[in-house]
Amino acid sequence: MGNTVGEFRKKLKIADIKGGPDEGLNRVGQTVVVMGWVRTLRVQSSVTFLEVNDGSSLSNMQCVMNSDAEGYDQVESGLIATGASIWVQGTLVASQGSKQKVELKVEKVVVVGKSDPSYPIQKKRVSREFLRTKAHLRPRTNTFGAVARVRNALAYATHKFFQENGFVWISSPIITASDCEGAGEQFCVTTLIPSSREAADSPVDAIPNTKNGLIDWSQDFFGKPAFLTVSGQLNAETYATALSDVYTFGPTFRAENSNTSRHLAEFWMIEPELAFADLDDDMACATAYLQYVVRHVLDNCKEDMEFFNTWIEKGVIDRLNDVAEKDFVQLTYTDAIGLLLKAKKKFEFPVKWGCDLQSEHERYITEEAFKGCPEIKAFYMRQNDDGKTVAAMDMLVPRVGELIGGSQREERLDYLENRLDELKLSKESYWWYLDLRRYGSVPHAGFGLGFERLVQFATGIENIRDAIPFPRAPGSAEF
Amino acid sequence: MGNTVGEFRKKLKIADIKGGPDEGLNRVGQTVVVMGWVRTLRVQSSVTFLEVNDGSSLSNMQCVMNSDAEGYDQVESGLIATGASIWVQGTLVASQGSKQKVELKVEKVVVVGKSDPSYPIQKKRVSREFLRTKAHLRPRTNTFGAVARVRNALAYATHKFFQENGFVWISSPIITASDCEGAGEQFCVTTLIPSSREAADSPVDAIPNTKNGLIDWSQDFFGKPAFLTVSGQLNAETYATALSDVYTFGPTFRAENSNTSRHLAEFWMIEPELAFADLDDDMACATAYLQYVVRHVLDNCKEDMEFFNTWIEKGVIDRLNDVAEKDFVQLTYTDAIGLLLKAKKKFEFPVKWGCDLQSEHERYITEEAFKGCPEIKAFYMRQNDDGKTVAAMDMLVPRVGELIGGSQREERLDYLENRLDELKLSKESYWWYLDLRRYGSVPHAGFGLGFERLVQFATGIENIRDAIPFPRAPGSAEF
């Protein structure tokens, strides 16, 4: 096909043809061209059925071909097979099948790229574990195509929500030599080790060192140790205290050695930060945000959501409708503990006031009771007047548990400095963060949301490694 | 103010008040509240003028205060000063000044957060070099507030353009253990070095090593050397050959030791990838994209663009209008060389067919001649039938030079394998990339655009370190 393929670009995608309210019936009689990949092939004596998918929608174009169609010999020679890419031209006709309103009566077919018989995604069902080893091909399956489209819709809805509400998108830095972040294990970023091609055979003693055998960071790219960010919050605060309302949406990292279905070493975070705002504003924002993106997916990804509802988690659509329409229950930490203490359920981790809520507790609250609760946490959280709790909140949702964690930030310089002292954190390292409290400090609040958790929540997909195209986990950074 | 600040959230921002077509005149007589930061303060005998900015727009709210306003004592005591955050309530009145249509007649003012007299951004002009050392405060200046808003508009327009054209946003991985990328110096990502707090005092011999003194990568987080990505293109290709049209928008990295005004170690890239597409489709997409985002900024950031046009680069608005409205000139590499050979200009790097175009050549073509040209480049570019050139293009624009680089990808398995052999690259490392050519390969094309270059192009800002909130460069990863 080569360079003649240019003229194809003006053609419609399958979603354009079949995606309208009458599912393509308005186009019956038109000559259309479809370009995509063969999902299945069914050869009968008089007629051949091809299911072609171009990724624009879950549903395929059913192509019906008689032996007099131009290019039919490619069926006989085996060139047209599962996984092959093809160009098909035909007339759109009403379908007699129950699965679609229209189908394509093929006039001409051309194999653009054949598929080697070793193609690993044949019609038979393949496990999601197996597909993780084929991350470059899994988007060609129903499940991962649908996950990609819903993930995309959630991302776009995220931008739309914040933009429509006057927030400014900020790119917080990925590499940071600031040791302000503290929380969690960090990846070191360095050029002291030779770049990719030679790295595998690098001698340890080639790493620059000082006279007393320490790593000589002055020779590293940034002149000191640098790490991958675990959160853009502190940086977002600097922009919130200038532009009022901002949000980040970018990758963050944890070098935690946990090989679970809930953790990734690399994941995307959404972190809005609101100036002149308190915890109530923060909760109102989190609620409005979540309801907006859920509604967007329900409205714009109907076919994919039906698929998840049937094959991945029965009831996921009802669950999302509940979130989009019902009020969230706000529950103080104390009330949450009270609820758990009264529960007729035996928990593995015993409950008492002051304890961190465990997954089993969160699940009880959201699935058997309802939702909402603050905890006792990070240095930047605003101290409440009781002197023992902070203005923090978690938004718990069924199935995923904690989806959003947020807080009002400590805007009072003296309180913040005391807190750093208490935690033995260096005030010098936080000079710029403290400056925000020195010059025109304002009450402000924000939250963080792990984007892949949101994808899990919206699709019902169980393992977080299936919620991102190329998951990174201990021992695993292929592709 | 503390927790009572919640009720403030319902209030309007300055952009809401003054941003309409009649610049606020429709609200004259209304009581409004403004919350923001004091930019300047002018105390006259009978009246005090405060310029307050909340970051929602370039322009401030001029607040006019008589000595009988509630809270006026905070002017006398010096609490209300440049940099302080305030809450002001008053009546909107028509302004007698020429710089704004409306101003606020203050009834009540409250200092939310005072500003220490050491506040480094006083009214006097400060250099952009100095402001880079205050990256946490510089968004409070006119220039960096405007850059942040235009950057935001460009990002949102990017998503809008691709979403409206049926592209799916893909997050390509940031950490990669695949050594497919090759191009450019990479940062190593490792947990063999202790995390942040202890890193500074790490002995070299604590790094795990094998018997023969090599770094023991089996003990690293990913079990082998891992790096920060230099491009998401190869990953995007995997999704394009499943979903047809996709794009990435995420951070990428170069560990190049170049301390210039054109390079960053960490920058954001936009990389669309189109299936069933050739180089013409690619150029058409790049042109449509650029014209769309430029038009979006001209339409939505009028005030900020006027600011850039006046203070940063005279003529930037005309330049952008040209790009949005005029056709791009397409020029083959051979014609570009011809043009340079005929030029009545002496170049530092001599020109002949086969050479790479240098910045001076690019500048000549875009600023003195016009634009467009393919070069001889990476392994994945599709070989032309002449056997010596590839189907690649650069989009050159005035001031920035190369803004977009793109190509049709080599979709033919045998050509690609030969090319890897020629370049002595390992076919085993590229197994998954080659798979895309093994199973239903399609002609496809894409391009890459450095987002900070686009910000420079749109704003006229000279140094790329001023086009991103927290720039990373050799020796510099503060904040």
Image (tube, coloured by chain):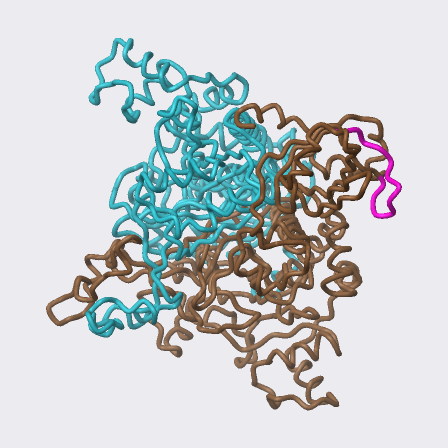
Chain colours: A cyan, B brown
Question: Which of B74/A170 is in front?
Answer: B74
Residue toward you, A121 or A427: A427
Horizontal side, residue B247 vs residue B423: left or right: right
Image position of B194 with respect to A208: above or below? above
Is B43 situated left or right of B445 in this image? right
Determine whether A161 is above or below B216 in the image: above
Q: Quadrant of residue B454?
A: bottom right
Question: Is residue B37 inside the magenta stretch?
Answer: no
Q: Residue at x 44, y 27 (%)?
A: A391
Name the residue: 68% across, 58% down.
B124
Identified at 58% across, 51% down, the residue is: B119
Indicate the position of residue B43 as horizontal and vertical percent values: 76, 44
Q: Which residues are magenta?
A: B90-101
Asked whether the viewer can see residue A41, the reply is no
Q: Is residue A395 left or right of residue B112?
A: left
Task: Determine if residue A466 is in view.
Answer: yes
Query: Relative to the observer, which residue lies in front, A155 or A407?
Result: A407
Q: Position of residue A189 (x, y in %)?
A: 35, 60
Q: Is residue B91 magenta?
A: yes
Q: Residue at the spot x=69%, y=35% of the render?
A: B13
Count of numbered marks: 0
Residue A88, position in %: x, y? 57, 50
